Amino acid sequence: MPAIQVENLSKIYPVAVKEPGLAGTLNHFFRRTYRSVAAVQSVSFEIGAGEVVGFLGANGAGKTTTLKMLTGLIHPSEGKIRVAGHVPFCRENAFLRKITLVMGQKQQLIWDLPALDSLRINAAVYGISDQTFRQRVGELSEMLSLQEKLTQPVRKLSLGERMKAELLAALLHQPEVLFLDEPTLGLDVNAQVSVREFLKEYNQRYKATVLLTSHYMADITALCQRVLMIHAGKLIYDGSLDGLLDRFAPCREVTVELAQGLSSSQLAVYGDLGNVDGRIAHFIVPQEKLTQMIARILADLEVVDLTVTDPPIEEVIGRVFRAGAI
């Protein structure tokens, strides 16, 4: 059985409509009218046990609303959900013990207490024995390199250390399904890499299922083989990262190193010119024109080196978001 099953999931919010002026205010008070806003529309997908799946979408696309329905925080307007064999909105104790939700902009640790005290509270909530508590804290803190930090007040930890402690608290009950909403938000590069490495190791060690949203594409490329893409509440792609590039990036990036620098106007005649850095120029070229363009450059210019690569995935994702459903 898949760890997550979603069928025709929708969430529609009624939003009050108010006209300007005094008359509009009086009508809004006595005869309020509403319009419907569809945050999520007929979304269906399945995620197998142990999969790490990226969930992509622009701000307001419906990612967080979907996560909240999957964790039982809000009730869907339509559709069916099963997570770890349970209906999330029933909020059964057995279900809550199998999942966790980590939101990069929220915290559960008590600010003025050592992180270890908050972890003891979590252990009491989940009925974790002292022996199991010590074993799990020891194991997870070693994986996160937090052994010396748990006795310090949370307010004295760096942002990266606090995020690691939040992850430890969220994983203390050893959940089967992890919902991660921007877990590296605001972290510096080193802290982001550390969190990614921990999540990869945790997935491999415990075979946990992970649904990850992030605006940092490095998180997705480092952890996820499969991605779901949502736009305006609708699922527009479900497949591999490589398949995403093949489907939405019919262009290639050509990087040329020249023996001597040329101006942008001189280089622009060869194609869609990106940035120019000294003697190195970048072009975005449609696949069908690639051979012709390279042949022309090699014939006309003194080339030291030339490479052809896929365009950066951030550019591909941005193109999809700008184009909408395809």
Image (cartoon, rainbow, N blue to C red):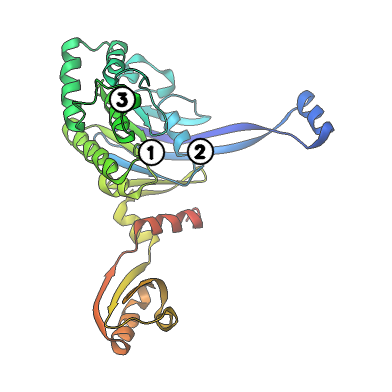
Q: In this orientation, does residue 54 appear?
A: yes
Q: Earlier in the sequence, mark 3 or mark 1?
A: 3
Q: Residues within 10 Å of mark 2 (few under 14, many from 20)?
A: many
Is disc 3 placed on a helix, strand or loop?
Answer: helix
> In the rendered structure, which amino acid carries the disc numbered 3?
Ala
Residue 260: x and y in percent read 30, 83
Q: Earlier in the sequence, mark 3 or mark 2?
A: 2
The structure residue drawn at horizontal position 53% and vertical position 29%, both measured from the top left corner, is 77
Q: Residues within 10 Å of mark 1 (few under 14, many from 20)?
A: some
Rendered position, 269 above or below 5 = below
Residue 320: x and y in percent read 45, 56
Count of numbered circles in the view: 3
The label on residue 40 is: 2
> In the rendered structure, which amino acid carries the disc numbered 2?
Val
The structure residue drawn at horizontal position 35% and vertical position 55%, both measured from the top left corner, is 244
Residue 25: x and y in percent read 79, 30
Indicate left or right for 103 with 175 as reference. Answer: right
Instruction: From the image, tell me which residue sits under label 1.
Output: 182
Disc 3 to disc 2, C-alpha distance: 26 Å
Rendered position, 109 above or below 164 = above
The structure residue drawn at horizontal position 34% and vertical position 63%, both measured from the top left corner, is 311
Q: Nearer the viewer, residue 259 or 286?
A: 259
Instruction: From the image, tell me which residue sits under label 3.
Output: 170
